[in-house]
Image: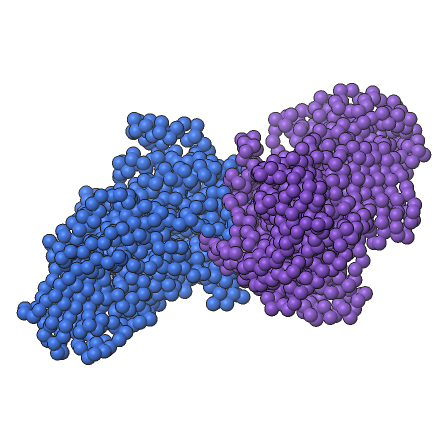
Chain colours: A purple, B blue
Amino acid sequence: MPSADPRYPVDPWRIREDSFDPASIARSETIFALANGWLGMRGSFEEGRCTATPGTYINGFFEETPIAYGETAYGYAKNRQVMVNVADAKVIRLFVDDEPLDLSTGALLSYERALDLREGVLDRKLRWRSPGGRDVEVRVRRLVSLTRQHAAAIEYSAAVSGRPVRLRLESAINADVPNAAAGADPRVGSHLLQRPLVTAGVSAAGRSASLRQETRNTKLALACAVTHDVQLPAGGTVKESAAAGAEEAVFRVEIAAAPGTALRLVKYIGYRASREHAARGLADRAAEAAAEAAALGFDALCAEQANLLASFWRRADVRIEGDDGLQQGLRFNIWSLLQSAGRDGRTSLAAKGLTGQGYEGHYFWDTEIYALPFFVYTKPEIARSLLLYRVNLLDKARARAAEMSQRGALYPWRTIGGEETSPYYPAGTAQYHIDADIVHALRKYLDAVPDRDLLLQGGAEMVFETARLWADLGDFIPDENGEFCINEVTGPDEYSALVDNNLYTNMMARENLEFAAALADRLGAEDVEEMRRISRAISLAPSEIERWRAAARRMRIPYDRDRGIHPQDDRFLSRARWDFEGTPAENYPLLLHYHPLVIYRHQVLKQPDVVLAQVLLGWRFSAADRKRNYDYYNPLTTGDSSLSPCIQSVAAAELGYTEEAYRYFTRTARMDLDDVNGNAADGAHIAAMAGTWISVVYGFAGMRDAHGRLSFSPRLPARWTRLSFCLLHRGRSLDVEVTHDSASYRLREGGEITFSHRGRTVTLRQGEAQSFSLEPQLECVIFDLDGVLTDTAELHYRAWKRCADELGLPFDRTVNERLKGVSRRDSLRIILRNAGISMPEGRQAAAAERKNDHYRELIGAIAPGDLLPGIPDLLRRLRSDGVKTAIASVSHNAAEVVQRLSIGPLIDCLVDSRGVVKGKPDPEVFFAAAEALGVPFENCAGIEDAQAGVEAIRAAGMFAVGVGAGLKGADWTVKSTAEITARSLKDRFSRWRPARRA
Amino acid sequence: MPSADPRYPVDPWRIREDSFDPASIARSETIFALANGWLGMRGSFEEGRCTATPGTYINGFFEETPIAYGETAYGYAKNRQVMVNVADAKVIRLFVDDEPLDLSTGALLSYERALDLREGVLDRKLRWRSPGGRDVEVRVRRLVSLTRQHAAAIEYSAAVSGRPVRLRLESAINADVPNAAAGADPRVGSHLLQRPLVTAGVSAAGRSASLRQETRNTKLALACAVTHDVQLPAGGTVKESAAAGAEEAVFRVEIAAAPGTALRLVKYIGYRASREHAARGLADRAAEAAAEAAALGFDALCAEQANLLASFWRRADVRIEGDDGLQQGLRFNIWSLLQSAGRDGRTSLAAKGLTGQGYEGHYFWDTEIYALPFFVYTKPEIARSLLLYRVNLLDKARARAAEMSQRGALYPWRTIGGEETSPYYPAGTAQYHIDADIVHALRKYLDAVPDRDLLLQGGAEMVFETARLWADLGDFIPDENGEFCINEVTGPDEYSALVDNNLYTNMMARENLEFAAALADRLGAEDVEEMRRISRAISLAPSEIERWRAAARRMRIPYDRDRGIHPQDDRFLSRARWDFEGTPAENYPLLLHYHPLVIYRHQVLKQPDVVLAQVLLGWRFSAADRKRNYDYYNPLTTGDSSLSPCIQSVAAAELGYTEEAYRYFTRTARMDLDDVNGNAADGAHIAAMAGTWISVVYGFAGMRDAHGRLSFSPRLPARWTRLSFCLLHRGRSLDVEVTHDSASYRLREGGEITFSHRGRTVTLRQGEAQSFSLEPQLECVIFDLDGVLTDTAELHYRAWKRCADELGLPFDRTVNERLKGVSRRDSLRIILRNAGISMPEGRQAAAAERKNDHYRELIGAIAPGDLLPGIPDLLRRLRSDGVKTAIASVSHNAAEVVQRLSIGPLIDCLVDSRGVVKGKPDPEVFFAAAEALGVPFENCAGIEDAQAGVEAIRAAGMFAVGVGAGLKGADWTVKSTAEITARSLKDRFSRWRPARRA
């Protein structure tokens, strides 16, 4: 349960602090950072006192320094790239009778700082008594314009309340700013060896000033210009001056102020940057940006900002009722995403956005896998720009692939400028999956936004070149049955490294390969000329596309049949389990307390890997596999990565572990506001913030978008009363609202939309709405066969008895009881164990075959009259009531029995042992029936006569009816099938409330 | 074939250069380096001109600096340790009329430099004409005393031949010396960021001087002192002076020399070092060392040196006749080993000895695995000292284990002071096998040198603590059949990293564990008090020793039954083979041209791994496995490590690939003399040098010493005519001499020795000698059963026919021909393939069983009369001639057939399919028979009637007799067994010369 941190009180739209806390300076600088995707300013005080890391950042503006290796090797990343802290234009120092405003001195009489997310203006108010006893009231409003990429503005007002004083404001552009240094924590950026920026010119004249900076190695240039508007109280003397120093341009204004009068200064700020040192007129262009803002005036800038945000929130807001703290956290996260994402196709979304230098300002897969869905469905133009960033760096990715001895293109694990900059390749370059992640994101975007231009202007090439990488990276390995293996890679989970056939990597690579082949086909058919041009440009031959298909077809997908789970990699299950019980809480995150060798040697996860694959590629997994995977991996997942909880939350929600999903959600929803990880000071966790949107939309609303087909399967946490949001999809705007009782959909804009709700297809026209009850309603009844529909149990007994007699094994009805619901081979094992006899595998197969021969002989005589009491009526009535029916049996002969019973027309679906990996009590056979019929498990009832069967139904989250005595855990137990009528069943079902997983 | 580098002409005992070559300065400094295991001086010219890296090193004297990581992590090695270049006392500058002697100016009239390995004195003679036209004749002799650890001396004579000149000598101790810098090659040491040594005092008075230095971080101190003896020509003026500068102490002497007169200066040098800066009297002790040498005089020092060397060579010399270049190389290598090894239990043997700063002067496993055998068998006191070095660092190894979250002790992969200093853990700390390597070496030493003291004074503790490490590092893994798995380690081959169950590591760990358990037993029985003391000291409980045994017993030993080889690790065979064909020659070594990920992803070896295990632990492998392992891995081995060829050479020699063994040997025997790797300038390849001794003794002489039992199986390369050497073993001194015709053994010293020669036990008393012919002689005949001893072939045909009829499969004698020598299951597969029918595995087993039932029925009727013509006589005659007999059959029923034929008493050994992994044409069954009888394969004949059998015999390197027509490749083909008599067989055998593998 999230208890809102008192630092930032709960408030649906505002982030505010009501007091000044010296210990929280750095953290508040992160929380109150303002940015517009290009220019970012941390929320440090203008006065330059009581600040921690007063950063100003420009997206994509970075310096490079060589990486020092203890021991280097061929192909290592050569240079570190670091987003630099540029000249600070926020500086406005206030002096009261020459005493500087400094909250750590004098007396702070009142203090408040707030950021209204609908206005986008940081607003600070305080009353301060100087050490000399002068009172001053200050209000500062700051904005970084979301409509004007290069502009920001600050309004600084100081009013005098006590006796007359001299007020002086010094407004500066200061180039002498530090860059963040790193300690032992690898998650914090390392320091630059020397100051990255050289000041190349400072000028000040009248109320304007400018300053130029250049990076030493990357040869980038920037200019910052300011111009001031001064409002003076009437009367009094005024002194104004401007000065240009070596590292600072200053504008000063001083007045003698009477009590009740105020000095108001508005500072309009322009920043421009260039990829060339020699860029001409950079300072002029910066001055222009400042002047344009000045011409508009501060209030008009505020109005622009509010207008843009109103329009943004109309699309992007997610409303949660029942939890104001989470509501606030979620909105803050969405706000932060808007602030951080690059919009120009040359920049992306740094791990900490533009709020700090953590992770050195690098772009990771965070953008594509975590942040992109939000933008695709709320701001597709930003999604496009982020993808364009990758397309624009295709040549560098080609060069990197060549350096890594591969064909195609290999994107860098972490970068700003496009080069690989990860100094630790096992958790860097080895994460080849970045290629497939990017293509996954591109495909998701294209599914929601038809965009032929992006495809033809590099997108398709990127898809082909990444497919090429995979086809060349892997090999068809003879010792692995000729399967296509991708060895020596690292998957998303960084607590394993350099593994063979990481499940996530191989599945994502397969998608990449298949998509590339399909795209080549489609373009070859629909865009013949363009496809010809692209093929020529990258020398793409049909034989290569064939290899992509073959690699995809023969891709090794690790699977463990015993457990019915996907191993994370070929060796994962051969590692020892981490000793969680023996690990003290203070030893987390493990990476700070154990050598990588120790961590890699064990079954322990930093973040979901298999489970991430099933969240991204759900349709590739059976429901039973998804459940077993989650149940296996979740206890092994430390969550030492902030990317963990949102994925765990989605996976848990899907399985009906709603409260578990909720707990994970709460860990990220206010991660930075509550400083959950204790490092908010270094910058915001942008990917985790994006993850909260994913948790809500993919998790609690159960949205899925495989192949661009939207579907919903909502499951609201107990504490919430309502959830609503809007999705943009192919130009349509769909409102979704979920309560515990119902889910409603309304097409706000666009001609028509088709999607599915809980397996039902829904079509809406513009303005239309439709609502669906979420109350449990019996949609499907899944019958066990033997002992429920007919008493083949007796036939099984007789067949086993005959078989046991032939083998000279003891066998009676007591032993027979233990065979109910158990597969044939396992039944034989029970009989053998009972007899204390071992038998070679080959002979067991033969014996089981013999039993089946006997059984088949016996079932030859089954007829409709063998249906158990009440069953014929029940089946007919369910059919007429529109309730679906299925048979879930582990028998191999179910189809024949059904046929002889003549109930085929009354049964919608038959799942037998051929379709499943694990028998009861695993829920797989019940999941499979519900999945085949498109019914959510909550709306299914299962009927069983065996304990293992009842357990399987409950594990599937369905209503369990037990037939016979001594069955534990059934939701309803009957003595005979005669008691089960359609009415009694529905009645019982309607009173049932599924047990929620705690 | 080694062509001696003309730089150092072939000469059995001397290393010399006959000309001055500016391009070879650095290399010659390595070759002419002098050292005594503690003090090392590179062979740079005294004059300080035309030098490259005039290094002076003290073993174990190092500086530390923090390692800079691009991205650091918990448990990484913290500091770099670098053996430093200390104050240079070699400096003696000659001025001729104020012109400095500088070989790059003026004219060099003659030049020669030589090092006689029997004298240990570097001797340089030259005549030089100065640019000003003055002629001078110079002779310089230098020694680093092998008898006096802290002393060295230089005799410098200058004679005038033309007109009178002024001669001035400036003899200095110079502290201003550089340390080697590193480039991109990770094999060269990295540079220190700042000068590691601070000069703490310089003094000069009269003819003596001294200088003190201290390291900044490790706080070590050293002093160097010199004293001079001057011999002047009669008459003339003499000027002498002494001066102490900031970084140099100088003694000057100047004379006016008439033609024909000479100036002779002898410089006596003393070095002392201390682990404390504050060490008192260090300079005095250095001066003492110099004074003691001076008191003796230069000629006496030379005599001491020669005496010591005479005694050394008596034990350590290895004589090769037939190849003077290799002879020279081998002696140079042995000399280098003597020079490099520490003797004080506080220092070890650096990768480059004391000849250069390559690999930063670090100690690796090279010492234990490569160098130690030489010392064990020629200078056991040095072997002891090297092991004591490890024992003395046990506490640091304990601390490192704890840091790595393990119990016990973990030795550092590379170190000087005992701390882990490897900056790249995948090829550093991950090489846990260092622990087992050290214990392997300790055990080898103890096998040859009973040394209770070493055991009780830390040796046993080291064995226990390393066993503890293994027991804690590995786990019994359920998914691996409960086997004890050691995951996430790197084996000796550094072209694989972070693998699971590296064969070498697991086998060596098993030895470590077993040895520890056995030692605990032995001490518990024989040294009750001591064992109690040790157990208390390290809290050793009996349950822990049980776990050692269990871990050893259940140790996972990867084995691939299809290929009959040991995979290098669990995943090795699932990797793609390296594209050797597509790799240009200039791309070797691969590590300089491919990213580690690319290398690790493939089947490619830097150096032997499985093959190293079989060289070290041969008795753990069958001969067939050894051959298959070698044949599989050798083509995958690049030899990019200089540690490769000697091991490949030993493995090849053992298999009879003598010429291949010879080629590998030649690659290391003159590695530095011929600069094979092109980096001799950085220092000598000490481990490779030790490897040449291993190649000769373990390879060509076939010495083995498992459990301290010596055995020999010599195989001389074609080019050599004689090989002889001496081994010290448990106080006995055994001379071994091998020619192509014979091997001779003589016990030089010691009461009695027992060893084995080619499987025969030999016992010698002091002074006794024994000689054995190496000419091929028929010692064993190995018979195939079916078709050679009796015609069960017909019975097989009838059994198969009946079986095929039952299954309704076509079968006739043509198909039957293809079944000869083929296993039962494979035979069935051939029949099925012929019929074009597939059959499930389980039913195949049953069908094969049916055939066997028929066959067993048929063989029930076999009687002695069914022996084929001539066989009874042949067997009886071989028996009476003392030739052993064996049956090598793939049949499961061989034993029964032999019994029914009543030939059991005439057969020494029966190997059937149960004993082998792979059937014919694999040689395994023949190897197994020869091994069981202890006969070398060269002295075996095999008799076969099937093509696969003939191929198997030839693959085993035996004499192949083929019975029947159409057999290819047999050495002798007969139509009927009747033709084979004991006489005819011996006759044919005696004329046979096995084909040598090219």
Which residue is more in the foreground, B633 or B213?
A: B213
**Residue located 55% across and 54% down the image:** A176
Question: Is there any visible trace of residue A129 in the rendered image?
Answer: yes
Q: Residue A841: percent from the left, percent from the top?
A: 63, 37
Question: Is there any visible trace of residue A653 in the rendered image?
Answer: no
Residue A562 lies left or right of residue B993; in this view the side is: right
Q: Residue B666: percent from the left, percent from the top?
A: 35, 63
Residue A752 lies left or right of residue A891; in this view the side is: right
Which residue is more in the foreground, A561 or B19?
A: B19
Q: Residue B699: percent from the left, percent from the top?
A: 34, 55
The single residue placed furthest to the left in the displayed view is B235
Count of marks placed on residues: 0
Which residue is more in the foreground, A194 or B804?
A: A194
Residue B379 lies left or right of residue A554; in this view the side is: left
In the displayed structure, B171 sits above or below A16; it is below
Q: Give the position of the N terminus of chain B as an image quadrant.
A: bottom left
